[in-house]
Structure formats: structure tokens, C-alpha cells
Amino acid sequence: MTPSPADLVITGCTALVHDEHEDIGFVENASIVVRDGVVESIRPEAGDVRLPDAVEHIDGRGQVAMPGLINCHTHAPMVALRGIAEDLPAEEWFNDFVWPIESNLTAKDVELGARLACAEMIRGGVTCFADHYFSMDTVAAVVAESGLRAHLGEAFFSTQGPEGREKSLEFALRHRGTADGRITTALAPHAPYTVTDDDLAATAALAREHGLPVHLHASESRGQTDTSLARYGRTPIEILERAGLLDLEAGLLVAHGTGIIERDLPVLERAAGRVAVATAPRGYLKFAWDPTPVRALRGVGVPVGLATDGAASNNSLDVWESMALTALVQKSAEGDPRWLTSRQALHHATLQSARAVGLGESIGSLAPGRRADIVLVDLTGPHTQPVHDLVATLVHSARSADVRTTVVDGRVLMRDRRLLTIDLPSAVRELGDRLPALIDRSHGRRIQEYDT
């Protein structure tokens, strides 16, 4: 009986793989067979081994096949506000620009921003992103259309009353496992400084009841931590512990954590649940914040995934840049050129990031049985030649524009830099038409007050 054709076969590439110790290695002149959205095999090509027929074939010569990158914390629709508030401290950025403008948001604005963001991420080799924003039904629809994988949460503040929390729960339950299983969901309280202790505890109870993870901002800066200590005698991390959010079996994803201090480390180490942190270094440099203490967090067993935050603060959704900046900023912060190595940075961009979003068993590495989330990176350009150390080339020389092909669940979303699932010119044109009304701040409203 003739076997059915594979969905996809990639030939002639150099495949990035992890061994049983999670060390990074490479298979030269490899073929990758994908069937039913899963990697079936990765092996060196040999003349006496016949590859299966395939619905689609990609010649990967001169390219590295690697796990798709994961953006562990962003606000995808905020690409509509890219560059709207520059060179400002966080309180002015929020209160004078972002939160007044966000009071104008419509579902259509969110849709167009999300579509533009998904296009940017596909072109940058991101195959999965964790999003924390408003009108998330709209974002979920764009994710389904785009073919990306996403971990989505409907954000809420305590000023919305119980309805905000209930809406977040309803979204999470309704969209969990949708888009052919590519969408996972979380409850999404904004932060300890905008959500009360009672609401945080209620969120933890709902998360336990329904088996949902939680995704929020906490200890975003050292200033927030100092203010929390002065007002409440507890750090933001200690507030999360008291609310029961560190003991969730389904997990807690903390965005930023640059204000995590020494006294927080034993709190995180004794957490009964899965706790992870997402780091977005470009935004911290812009706000003059300290970096996330990656070394200390790894020391207490907390996975640190890579992120960009929203493009309003970060200006891009480029996880390649986050990977390189994480390595460089950590070296500077620790005063140690041996930390964070290129291999460690690549590990954070792949397996560590997969664990941060709760998908460590299915994505983050290329191996039989894993979901076929794959990007092909062209290293033939002058800025990546010659290659003496392939890992260092990927981390410090390659750019997002070197991604030639992006595959999610075995489906090709971009081939040879051509987007196949998103009409980018239409999204840009429609969003441009809507910008004057969106960015109007003359009404004097804002969705929240930043007071930390």
C-alpha cells in the first residue's frame, strides 16, 4: 500500500535541534518531513533513503531550519500607536498618550492593528505570540485567519468592576483550543497597581476552578517595586503570592519583572505553581529601567522567555532583536562577558519561551512529535558571512529580514518573503484612514491612571 503524501518536506537545510540535555546542535544537509501538522522526522539526507512524496516541497539549501520564535508578551494591536509617544518616562507615556488614545479604540482599530502585527511577526519568524489586550475576540479572529499560534488574554482593570474579570473569563473559556488548537488562553488582569488584592485573589480562584493560566504585568520597574513597598509593605511579587497566583498548576506568566529584587527570589523559588517571566529589553532601555534579572531568575528555576511588549513602547515586534539585546544587556548588567552566551540566548528564544507560554511539550524545538512550527533563515547574505560559529551568527548577525519562510502547524504562512495569509497593503491602507480619529486626545479621557 502506497503511503499518503506528507504535508511538507524541507530538504537540504541545516536543522537546529536540541539533544536530550537540551544542548543545541545542528544536522547538516537535513530533510524534515511534516505530516498532520507534526514533525515526523529530521535526518541527514542519504542517497539510499527515499523521501516520501509531499503536497509541498521546500528547497532549504543555504538556510537554517529552526523552531519558530515565540513572542512571550505583547499587545499586538498597539502597532497602531508605533512611535506615538517617544522619549518619555513611563507615567507620561501612559497618562498623556497611550491611555487617552486607547479610550478611542474600536474593535475595527484592534482588528487592523492585530492584522498588521501578525504580518510583521510572520515576516520576522515569530510563530507564536502571547497577547494581552482589549477586544480580544477580534484578535482571536485575526489569529485564526493568519495561521499563527497565540496565547490570548482579555485584559481588565478593577475600575471596570466584576464585569471586567467576568469578561476575561468568558473570553478564555470560549476561545480555549480554537483555531484548530492553535489558540490557548489565559485570564489577564492588568497589573497589581491597577487590579486590587481582592480581584487578584478572585482571579486566582477562577484560574484554579477552570484550569486556566494567568498573564499579567508585575514588577515592571524598580520604581514600581519601591512604591509598592512604601504603600503596602510588600513587593508586587509578594502581592501575587498572597493572592494565590504563584500556586497555579496552569501557570503564571509575569511580564517584565525588571523590578524583581533579592527578597522576591525565595518567594518565586517556593512557588507551588509554574511561574515564568517574559523579558522585553528594548523597551526597558527606552524607559531607562533596569533589565530583567535573568541570571537570578534562572537560579531559582524560573523560565525567562523573550518578548517585545507592544510596538507603542518597543517600536517593533522583532524577537531577533530581543534575543541579541538580552544577551548584550545581561552581559553589561552582570559585568560578565561569559554571561549570557549565544547558546543561552538561543535557548531562551526557543525552549525557555515555549515553557513560558505553557507550550513546552509541543513547540520550542524541532523533533519528531513536536508541532511543525518552523522558520527557514537565509545565512548567505554578506552580514552573516563567513560563519565561524553558527549559533553566534544566528543570535548576533542574523536579522528578522533573513527569515525566508515561516511555517506553523505544517502550513506555510510565508514563502520566500511572500505573505500567504494576510493582505498587508489593505491593512496598512485601512489603518491609515482611521488614524486621525484614533489618536485624537482632545476629549481629555483616559482608560486608567498610572500612579506608581
Image (spheres, rainbow, N blue to C red):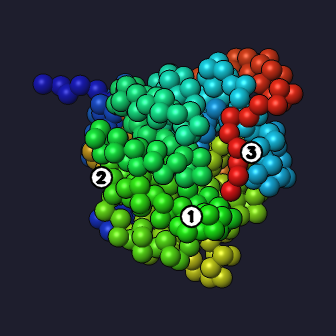
Residues packed near mark 2 inside 10 Å, few (<14), some (14 to 19) or many (20 plus): some
Sequence-first disc among 1 and 2:
1
Foreground label between 1 and 2: 1
Residues packed near mark 3 inside 10 Å, few (<14), some (14 to 19) or many (20 plus): many
Q: Mark 1 points at which residue?
A: 232
Residue shown at the point (76%, 51%) measured from the top left: 91
Residues packed near mark 1 inside 10 Å, few (<14), some (14 to 19) or many (20 plus): few
Between the residue at mark 2 and the residue at mark 3, the CA separation in whole angstroms equals 33 Å
- Residue 8 lies, with reference to residue 229, above or below; the image says above
- In which quadrant is the N terminus drawn? top left
- In which quadrant is the C terminus drawn? bottom right
- Residue 420 lies, with reference to residue 66, above or below; the image says above
Residue shown at the point (36%, 30%) measured from the top left: 173
Q: Where is residue 347 in the image (x, y as percent from the top left)?
A: 47, 62
Left or right position of 187 against 423: left
Sequence-first disc among 3 and 1:
3
Sequence-first disc among 2 and 3:
3
Q: Where is residue 109 in the image (x, y as percent from the top left)?
A: 68, 22
Q: Name the residue under label 3.
A: 94
Q: Which amino acid does label 1 sit on?
A: Tyr
Report helix, strand or loop for mark 2: loop
Residue shown at the point (20%, 28%) measured from the top left: 3
Report helix, strand or loop for mark 3: helix
Report helix, strand or loop for mark 1: helix
Q: Which amino acid does label 2 sit on?
A: Glu
- Residue 309 lies, with reference to residue 179, above or below; the image says below
The count of marks equals 3
Q: Mark 2 points at which residue?
A: 249
Residue shown at the point (56%, 49%) measured from the top left: 191
Residues at marks 3 and 1 touching, judged by CB atoms closer than 8 Å = no
Q: Position of residue 161 (x, y in %)?
A: 52, 33
Using the rendered view, name the quadrant where residue 52 is placed. top left
